[in-house]
Image: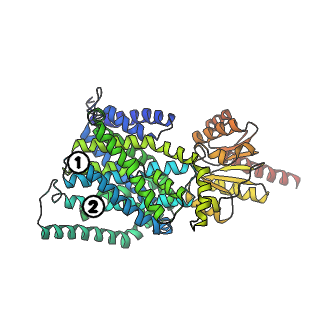
Amino acid sequence: MPHHTPLIATIVGGLVLAFIFGALANRLRMPPLVGYLVAGICVGPHTPGFVADANLAQELAEIGVILLMFGVGLHFSLKDLLSVKAIAIPGAIAQIAIATLMGMALAWAMGLGIGTGLIFGLSLSVASTVVLLTALQEWRLVETRRGQIAIGWLIVEDIVMVLALVLIPALSGALGGAGETLSTGALLMTLGITLGKVIAFVAVMLVFGRRLIPWILERIADTGSRELFRLAVLAIALGFALGATYIFGVSFALGAFFAGMILAESELSHRAAEESLPLRDAFAVLFFVSVGMLFDPSILIREPLLVLATLFIIVVGKSLAALVIVRSFKYPLSTALTIAASLAQIGEFSFILATLGISLGLLSSNGRDLILGGAILSILINPLLFVGLERLKPWLKRREEGDAEGGIAPDREDRQAPVLPQHSHAVLVGFGRVGHMAADALRRQNQPFIVIEDHIDSIEILSATGTPAIYGNAAAPGMLDAAHIAGAHYLLIAIPDMLEAGQIIEHALKINPNLHVVAHAQSVAEIEHLEKRGARDVIVGEQEIANCMVAKVSAGAFNRGGH
């Protein structure tokens, strides 16, 4: 057996180090994304020790991009965007333009060309979906008006970046990168052909893909095979991405995005998202590792002023632009500050744009290192901005009382905050099939309860029925406190993840040692794990069914004996 296995070494080395540094970052209350980038730096050519195969890492990163964009499409909500379109669409476009111009100005000061400046500026203008959603969930802002505006704003940014990924290769020659420099007429013709291919692809996806993708998944779901369903989801994501490139000449990213967006309309979209998540996360990690491999940390010493200037544009420049834009639309200061803090970082699309710029000869390695350095530092700083925002909350509330007299409506968080029970209630974690039945039973018994759920669609259903609910992961800091766990009598765990359930139980019992915890498990090992964490009652679904069956048999035998 050959010992020279660069593919295996790259995958294993990347994932193992990503796990180590990701866990360390999580321990330090930082996004795991920072750890993945650091892992890439460790296996890259700019640091001593093991060096992964950069070419193989880039191939794996392409799969990561496809699955990331598929995930963006799956979570794309036209309804959410339309609800905040009046501010999100013009605001995001204006903010992208301002941030791009600031990046181009810095590139010009470094003596770089317009094409490099455009890539550099666009990379600094778009925030990370992962970082934004994590922050909004942790601070329980997703359900608020400002949280929805921030999400809608990010959707518009993502759409603009998808269009940029399509158009930049066609313009690379004119911008000074790889490719022929075309005359005005030839350039317009090339752009027309490129846009025509995109329109043709979109039309085919909307006409045929809209019918074909759900039909395939429904047929596979009918087989009852989880393996085939998972494989079908991945085949759709990767197959449509590759087909979009070979048939229509558009990017992998656009093909995967549209496949996910069309699948999002299907009733099976949640299951598709869940089934594709493990592989999507794994390749996304490899994507971030491959980005980290490209980063030369010596730039922090060689060009500290340029790194600080880049960080200033990301954290201060575009955030101030967003603040001014939101205030000009007569929104409260708390909304403006939340959106400004949400956008004060960069992530996935920035890395994708930087990688594209390098491949087209539009971005130098120095520019890429500035983008990566700015990303890592801004992601580290971003949680501190939300901490500061939380501490300003009393002052902002007083300030907005004055704003209300001037015709500025307060944020929906203050107007429509759900009335949550605070004593003698039950906290139900999860609103899947088990959680749904548990909620119905609690209602029949007139037992007050609060649901903690991390699927926004379920939250909307609960809100529509007037059921107190909190959006987010119950294991995240502050979530159990928000559900007033200290005054609760019961904690009902209705999620299938044993490790997460154990973490929630331990945290809850530290706050309220007298809590009666009821959980469900799927094996003897899970029962032992949950009981060690403090669960008083652990129910195994299959065992309960078996007991009921045997009870029915016993009852029947007794009745026959009586006759």
Secondary structure of the residue carrying numbered label 1: helix
Q: Amino acid at mark 2?
A: Val
Horizontally, is 46 left or right of 475 in the view?
left
Q: Residue placed at 44% from the left, 59% from the top? A: 324
Using the image as rendered, state which of residue 449 and residue 266 is in the foreground. Answer: 449
Q: Which mark is residue 93?
A: none
Using the image as rendered, state which of residue 71 and residue 522 is in the foreground. Answer: 71
Looking at the rendering, in which quadrant would you find the C terminus? bottom right
Q: Which mark is residue 109?
A: 1
Query: Is any part of residue 328 visible from this angle?
Result: yes
Between tags 2 and 1, which lies in front?
A: 1
Residue identifier under label 2: 166
Using the image as rendered, state which of residue 381 and residue 468 is in the foreground. Answer: 381
In the rendering, at what x and y percent does residue 458 appear?
A: 59, 59
Horizontally, is 350 left or right of 510 in the view?
left
Query: Is any part of residue 217 visible from this angle?
Result: no
